[in-house]
Image (cartoon, rainbow, N blue to C red):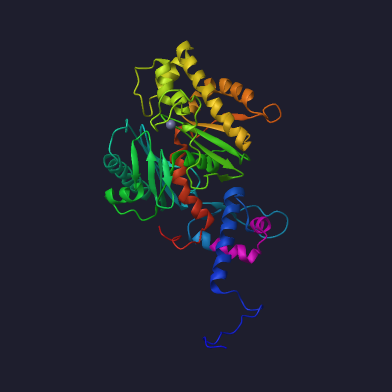
Amino acid sequence: VSTGPTPGPVPRATERPRPTDQADVRRHNAALVLGCVSEAGPLSRARVAAHTGLTRATVGTIVDELIAGGLVSEQGTRAPAGVGRPGTDLALRPDGAAGVGLEINVDGIVAAVVDLGGTVRHRVARSGDLRGRTAAAVLRSAARMVDDAVAAAYDLGLPVRGIGVAVPGLVDLGEQVLRLAPNLGWTDVAVAERLRSYAVTSWPCPVVLDNEANLAALGELWTGGHGSTDSFVLVNGDVGVGAGVVLEGRLHRGSRGFGGELGHLTVAPDGPECRCGARGCLEQVAGLDFILRQAGVRDAPRTGEDAVAPLLARLARGDERAVAAVRQAGESLGVGVAALVNLFDVDTVILGGVFAPLFPWLDEPLQAVVHRRVLSAAWAPLTVRPSRLGRDAAVIGAAYAPLRDVLADPLGADASVA
Ligand SMILES: [Zn+2]
């Protein structure tokens, strides 16, 4: 019994795809072309067609759109190879888009503008111990720094496509709420929403919140220059210790997005009490507070950009107490890293944050513990290396996150916003 509306004509197989599908195909192809130019460029249109498997006509149309959108530029004139007319090579335009990154950490705030090529174009840091300060006070000054970064990007002629915010705690990605930051003493703070409400200017793009170690790991993956390494753990050291686990090129967040809390891995069940309420967490025996205290460094700001400078000076002149303190932290880190390697079989660990400059002193004790504790160590050696992004991995990851969206969908709805 047919009482419903008369069904429309059944599309024939030879009909053109519906507009949405066509649009999807076009966007997919655009991402393919831009990805190819970005990773392998400068390249001729013909080479792009060969690399992507698209027709030269399709590549030509997409390239025109990408050039119009400011994401790709034509470079000089190549000498003709054999027969045929001379052509131009296509390259990614680094200034075609930019992201603003904001890192709110225990020891200060950093804001940066990163362009599509992964270069930091503007950076401002404010050091200061944020423990005990209210979220409102911190977010007000952070919003001012974002205001300035957006203005700096504008002055540089960089279209801002998004603002990424890194925070040292558990982030509810769906609700965009910082659930808990033990070292700051903050709970349930809607960071992105509040930053916007404190801003002086209206930001013309999305604001996205994420965990700082996760963003640091993504910063390493996207711009860290680690070549073909697509499975690694980034261990980010500061007052707190965090980890971002990247497996086969993807950040492993866990089922609710709260994974990677290496700093709260128990390494000494009866050890010192942690800000999280538990005992013997890794960051209590490997974090910056522990290292400075053990090293007897008191003539330095305990936080911020300069916190490790006096420590590094002592290490450089072979100060025994400083060396012992860092080695002790390295052994504790080794216990945490061994647990990660036993679980995930990653072959590379990247030490970021304050651990990057301390790498020469951390490496040997860390590796010795890993060798004793990792079952597969004899057959599967672990590479440990310092991050080249150092303490900026998280803010760079935060700034670059919206640019990944541009690369994934260069002709997306907001692609022409400048
Ligand atoms: Zn803890």
Q: Is residue 124 above or below residue 331?
A: below
Q: Is residue 114 visible?
A: no
Q: Is residue 193 magenta?
A: no
Residue positioned 43% across, 25% down in the render: 284
> If the image is split into quadrants, where does the C terminus sit?
bottom left
Residue 409, horizontal then vertical, whole percent: 52, 58
Q: Is residue 261 above or below residue 82?
A: above
Residue 296, horizontal then vertical, whole percent: 39, 15
Q: Is residue 159 above or below residue 266?
A: below
Residue 349, horizontal then vertical, whole percent: 57, 32
Residue positioned 65% across, 62% down in the render: 54
Furthest residue in direction right, as rendered: 82
> If the image is split into quadrants, where does the N terminus sit?
bottom right
Write down the quadrant of residue 307 in the picture: top left
User: How many numbered badges does the structure rendering display?
Assistant: 0
Q: Is residue 358 visible?
A: yes
Residue positioned 48% across, 25% down in the render: 269
Q: Which residues are magenta?
A: 46-64
- Between 103 and 337, which is closer to the camera in this rendering? 337
Residue 230, horizontal then vertical, whole percent: 61, 41
